[in-house]
């Protein structure tokens, strides 16, 4: 019996996943435990096992497609089975199309496979028609937004499937349209069915052009090659997946909070001395891999215990102050910035905190961090010191009300007790706080307390 594999749900907040790579092609055999494809959410990458053994009869999504969770992505069965009968019904993905004759026997309903780790609902709520298989979801959404009929396009995806790049190519080939013209077309215009220019600004086709017949369906003029192209060769890359999510969230954070950054520094001599001693410590102590950043994380937990106002979320017109510190830790990955959370960080020893920070960072870099490990932080630390940054403006990870930026250690002039001036290593600190709930004085007190803890970090470790 054939099986329809659906896109698994990766966490409660994930609505869709980018299908990044198929491990198997149509016609190939696959085992139940073999990886069929790789998918990516806005937070991490995952491998999706086939869930059942058989032959890959049909792949219902192309690489690069943004597929809603619980939507069928592949059909696995035995050679010769009719995969179209499995996904062509109007009632559900498992309903087969049967002839109108009452004497005809209905096609068997397939089972639905999902990875054992994914909690899924009945796929009956996510129908997939045969027509929709020919156009990817991303291509369909873009075409609808730009009033383009994707059925008129030649697809370059698997099996002639129309994918996003086909729609973008058609949009580049047609004249620009005004907003009113887009609304007037209503998704019925083909890529090469409009004149090359209109009466609007910059040659845009307007609604008046369409109403007067200037927008009649005529072949568009072929573009002429320029003798000296300007500006020359370039590459356009769509902003998608986690990078798009980061961009949207940063703008939302800046647009909904009153962010103000405070800069200070802390004596770093004892930090450096302690780090050097721990690096040379016996392996049995478990301290040789402790970094300066780990010491900063430990100090932040101690200060948040003393300054709980900044260990909080602004939720509408209320402030939720947390008893425990769930410390967000920004990690730079090839896919973008991820912020895993060290749960109950204030209850951990330095060695435990360092070990958990390294485990989460490695999981982010390998794409194996779970969605649950990327949510629930109450305060965030981001460190750019290793890149030589002396001061920067961190952006709040809303609804948190504070985020600490850690800068590099530099020699700075300081006045000694005898009145002379000397140089000492100082660690730069940049605190961004939401001024809607954290005024300048509490933010300054936080930085002052943090500098004092870091200056005597060895004493605080004995606390």
Image (tube, helix red, strand yellow):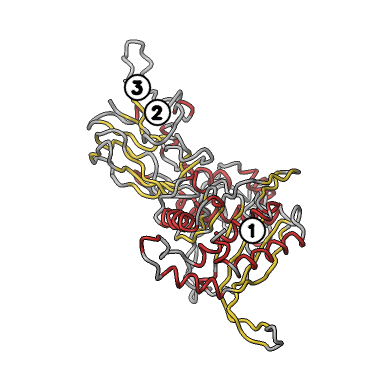
Which numbered marker is on residue 88? 2
Foreground label between 1 and 3:
1
Foreground label between 1 and 2:
1
Mark 2 surroundings: few (<14), some (14-19) or many (≥20) residues within 10 A: many
211 or 17: nearer the eye? 17
Task: Name the residue tied to disc 3.
Answer: 109
Task: Name the residue tied to disc 1.
Answer: 303
Residue 2 image offset from top left, x and y in percent: 29, 28
Q: Is residue 82 above or below residue 252?
A: above
Q: For numbered disc 3, what is the local secondary structure? A: loop
The Cα–Cα distance between marks 1 and 2, rounded to whole angstroms, is: 60 Å
Q: Earlier in the sequence, mark 1 or mark 2?
A: 2
- Is mark 1 in CB contact (under 8 Å) with mark 3? no
The Cα–Cα distance between marks 1 and 3, rounded to whole angstroms, is: 60 Å
Foreground label between 3 and 2:
3
Q: Residue furthest top?
A: 103
| Picture quadrant where residue 288 is located | bottom left
Residue drawn at x 66%, y 56% as measured from the top left: 402
Q: For numbered disc 2, what is the local secondary structure? A: loop
Residue 457 image offset from top left, x and y in percent: 57, 66
Residue drawn at x 40%, y 28% as measured from the top left: 88
Residue 364 image offset from top left, x and y in percent: 44, 54
Q: For numbered disc 1, what is the local secondary structure? A: helix
- Is mark 1 in CB contact (under 8 Å) with mark 2? no
């Amino acid at each position: 019996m054939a099986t329809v594999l659906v896109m698994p749900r990766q966490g409660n907040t994930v609505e869709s996943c980018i299908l990044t790579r198929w491990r198997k092609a149509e016609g190939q055999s696959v085992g139940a435990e073999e990886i069929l494809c790789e998918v990516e959410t806005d937070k991490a990458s995952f491998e999706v096992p086939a869930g059942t053994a058989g032959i890959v009869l049909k792949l219902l999504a192309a690489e690069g497609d943004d597929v809603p969770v619980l939507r069928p992505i592949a059909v696995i069965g035995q050679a010769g089975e009719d995969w179209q009968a499995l996904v062509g019904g109007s009632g559900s993905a498992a309903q087969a199309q049967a002839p109108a004759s009452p004497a005809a026997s209905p096609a068997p309903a397939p089972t639905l496979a999902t990875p054992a780790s994914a909690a899924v609902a009945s796929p009956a709520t996510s129908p997939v028609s045969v027509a929709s298989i020919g156009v990817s979801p991303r291509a369909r959404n873009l075409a609808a937004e730009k009033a383009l009929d994707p059925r008129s396009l030649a697809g370059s995806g698997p099996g002639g499937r129309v994918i996003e790049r086909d729609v973008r190519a058609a949009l580049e080939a047609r004249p620009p349209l005004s907003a009113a013209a887009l609304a007037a077309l209503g998704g019925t215009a083909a890529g090469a069915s409009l004149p090359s220019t209109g009466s609007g600004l910059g040659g845009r086709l307007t609604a008046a052009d369409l109403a007067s017949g200037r927008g009649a369906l005529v072949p568009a003029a072929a573009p002429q090659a320029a003798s000296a192209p300007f500006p020359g060769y370039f590459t356009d890359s769509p902003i998608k997946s986690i990078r798009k999510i980061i961009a949207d969230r940063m703008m939302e954070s800046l647009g909904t909070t009153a962010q103000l950054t405070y800069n200070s520094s802390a004596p770093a001599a004892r930090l450096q001395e302690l780090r050097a001693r721990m690096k040379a410590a016996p392996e049995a102590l478990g301290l040789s891999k402790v970094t300066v950043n780990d010491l900063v994380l430990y100090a932040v937990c101690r200060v948040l215990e003393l300054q709980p106002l900044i260990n909080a979320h602004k939720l509408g017109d209320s402030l939720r102050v947390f008893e425990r510190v769930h410390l967000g830790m920004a990690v730079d990955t090839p896919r973008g910035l991820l912020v895993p959370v060290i749960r109950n960080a204030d209850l951990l020893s330095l060695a435990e905190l360092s070990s958990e920070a390294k485990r989460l960072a490695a999981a982010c870099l390998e794409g194996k961090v779970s969605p649950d490990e990327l949510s629930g932080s109450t305060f965030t630390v981001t460190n750019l010191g290793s890149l030589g940054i002396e001061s920067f403006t961190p952006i709040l990870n809303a609804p948190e009300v504070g985020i600490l930026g850690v800068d590099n250690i530099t020699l700075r002039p300081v006045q000694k007790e005898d009145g002379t001036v000397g140089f000492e290593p100082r660690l730069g600190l940049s605190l961004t706080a939401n001024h809607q709930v954290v005024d300048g004085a509490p933010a300054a007190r936080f930085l002052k307390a943090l500098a004092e803890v870091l200056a005597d970090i060895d004493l605080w470790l004995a606390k």
